[in-house]
Image (cartoon, rainbow, N blue to C red):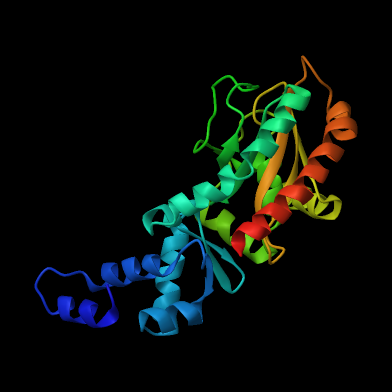
Amino acid sequence: MDLINTINQAKKKDFALTLARGLTVIDTYSAERPTMTTSEIARRVGISRAAARRLLLTLVAFDYLECDGPRFRATQKILNISGAGPIADAMWQKITADVLAISNRFNEPCSVAVLNGMNIVFVVRDSKRRIFSAPLSVGDKLPAHCSAGGKVLLASLEPDTFRQRLSTTGPLRPRTANSIVAPDELARELRLVRRNGWAKAEDEMEVGTIAVAVPLFDKSNDVIAALTISSHKSRRSMDELIDDFLPVIQNAADRISDSLAEADH
């Protein structure tokens, strides 16, 4: 619905103009245009910057958008509504073979996840192998602060964005005694992840589980997803994951990032 039709509809009884504007904001996002500033939204919707910012922050609170400094990035939730879901799905399908090849090489679960609020959402996952008590598949969520992939994605956020996200989601809940839930401690962990360029998680989601993860980049060199390989202490050690598995997924991440950048063109 364009602005003129929105205004005309607003003259009718029982029409919610604010909701209409919010839906118009959602409609402006697409797979080809996943990130915009407040000024861009205000211009496209035909409202003031202040009104646009209120709408954008409301959508952030409900996990339709992610705020990264001055820019607002669409989550998969908003892309599905705006009709970009199949396009995004095709992009992830393009790298599924790479992910499964890693799983087959090590006989361990490998996955790609994106950030949604303070959760990760799987967009590619080997469903044949598992380390958690409950099976996981594409579309399932896990808390980001307990997972290696989640740490990679949280570490890609600007510090102010990270703090704002924490303030809107409330206290982090532990999954095990080793889960990092204190904001200051998690911030220190994320600084280490940024410095190293990869993350690990040990006994944080479930006791016995271990994982390492690396970032995937788009053509603008922004982190858009995390590539993770996981195992269980009954089969592997964390040292083995770091020494043997990590170099492999780092090399794979370079190839996959190049593939994703080509898909953006």
Q: Quadrant of residue 221?
A: bottom right
How many numbered marks does the figure carry? 0
Q: Quadrant of residue 93?
A: top right
- In the rendered structure, the answer to whether residue 2 lies left or right of residue 227 reads left
Front residue (pair 149, 261) = 261
Residue 4 in view: yes
Q: Is residue 7 shown left or right of residue 79?
A: left
Q: In terms of depth relative to the viewer, which is nearer, 213 or 250?
A: 250
Q: Quadrant of the C terminus?
A: bottom right
In the rendered image, residue 257, in percent from the top left (x then y), is placed at 71, 53
Q: Residue furthest left?
A: 13
Residue 193 vs 159, above or below: the answer is above
In the rendered image, the vertical position of residue 202 relative to residue 214, given as above or below: above
Residue 33 in the image: x percent, y percent?
A: 51, 68
Give how far across and how far down residue 24 sits, in percent. Answer: 33, 70
**Image: 173 above or below 13:** above
- Look at the image and tell me in which quarter the N terminus lies: bottom left
Instruction: Single out the residue that lies furthest toward the top.
Output: 234
Q: Residue at x 81, y 20 (%)?
A: 236
Q: Residue at x 61, y 34 (%)?
A: 174
Question: Residue 239 appears at what percent x and percent y?
Answer: 88, 29
Whether residue 155 can be seen here: no
Identify the residue at image location x=75%, y=51%: 190
